[in-house]
Image (spheres, rainbow, N blue to C red):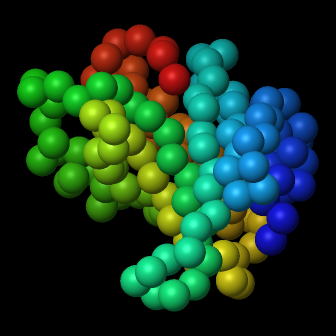
Amino acid sequence: MDLTAFMKRYAEEIRGQYIEYTQTLSVIIIPVSGNRFQTVMGTIKQSSLYNRKVIIFTSKVCPLKNDIDYKMLLEQTAYFNYCRFMIAENYLQVEAVSSLAGVDEGDIKEMLQEVANIADQYEMKLSGTDVH
């Protein structure tokens, strides 16, 4: 899959914004409810666990804090189709991962939207503001 071409087309389709960094790293700014936007990073990497290429979409939720109910977040993940919460670079983030082989554009669009919507929802819930 040509991640760059797909992300450009999808950004135009949803009236978002596309930013290219490399052929395997792109950023798309996705409109979400309430006239807000959420930044989602798309990366293609080689999975050492399964020895295949995977596509990873991530979006920051908020900086780590002691008062976040991490157990509740873990329980909420059971209701998501593609996403999970993760911690990276001292941030709570939302992530979706799929094998690059066999995934279709419809699935990728759903993954992107779910990452953006969940990250935005929990960003507002946990921090009360629209930062990312």
In this view, which residue lies farthest toward the bottom?
Answer: 51
- Residue 99 to residue 84: above or below: below
Image quarter (top left, top right, bottom left or bottom right) of the N terminus: bottom right
Residue 119 pos. (x, y %): 45, 36
Residue 19 pos. (x, y %): 77, 35
- Residue 40 to residue 81: above or below: above
Residue 125 pos. (x, y %): 32, 23
Residue 116 pos. (x, y %): 56, 39
Q: Which one is in front, 60 or 30? A: 60
| Horizontal relation, residue 16 to residue 71: left or right | right
| Horizontal relation, residue 92 to residue 29: left or right | left
| Horizontal relation, residue 16 to residue 77: left or right | right
Can the viewer see residue 111 in this picture?
no
Q: Residue at x 61, y 18 (%)?
A: 36
Number of residue marks: 0
Q: Residue at x 75, y 64 (%)?
A: 106
Q: Residue at x 55, y 59 (%)?
A: 56
Q: Residue at x 51, y 65 (%)?
A: 97
Can the viewer see residue 42 in this picture?
yes
In this view, which residue lies farthest toward the front?
Answer: 22
